[in-house]
Image (tube, rainbow, N blue to C red):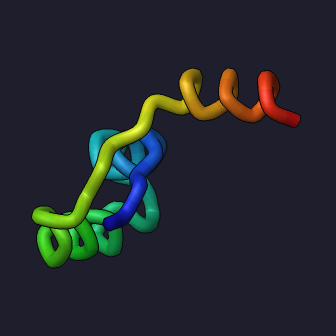
């Protein structure tokens, strides 16, 4: 499983420098991807650190 942050999708949507790498990774691993929401991850870190 791969946990992807929303920034990966922003890279693609904004057609930034590494968008092709992101697209390739997603297409190669689409069945093993979990999408995260940065705010949730941030909240978890704050609560447990």
Instruction: Report the label total.
Output: 0
Q: In which quarter of the image is residue 41?
A: top right
Task: Point out the residue furthest to the right here.
Answer: 49
Q: Which residue occupies 19% across, 72% down?
A: 29
Residue 21 at x, y = what percent?
A: 33, 74
Q: Is residue 25 left or right of residue 43?
A: left
Residue 32 versus residue 4 in the image, above or below: below
Residue 10 at x, y = what percent?
A: 39, 40
- The quarter of the picture where the C terminus appears is top right
Residue 25 versus residue 12 in the image, above or below: below
Q: Which residue occupies 42% across, 67% down?
A: 18
Q: In which quarter of the image is residue 22?
A: bottom left
Q: In this view, does 5 lie to the left or right of 42?
A: left
Front residue of 6 and 15: 6
Front residue of 17 and 2: 2
- The quarter of the picture where the N terminus appears is bottom left
Residue 11 at x, y = what percent?
A: 40, 49
């Amino acid at each position: 499983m791969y946990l992807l942050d929303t920034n990966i999708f922003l890279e693609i949507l904004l057609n930034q420098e590494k968008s092709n790498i992101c697209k390739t990774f997603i297409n190669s691993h689409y069945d093993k991807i979990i999408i995260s929401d940065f705010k949730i991850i941030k909240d978890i870190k704050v609560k447990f650190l």
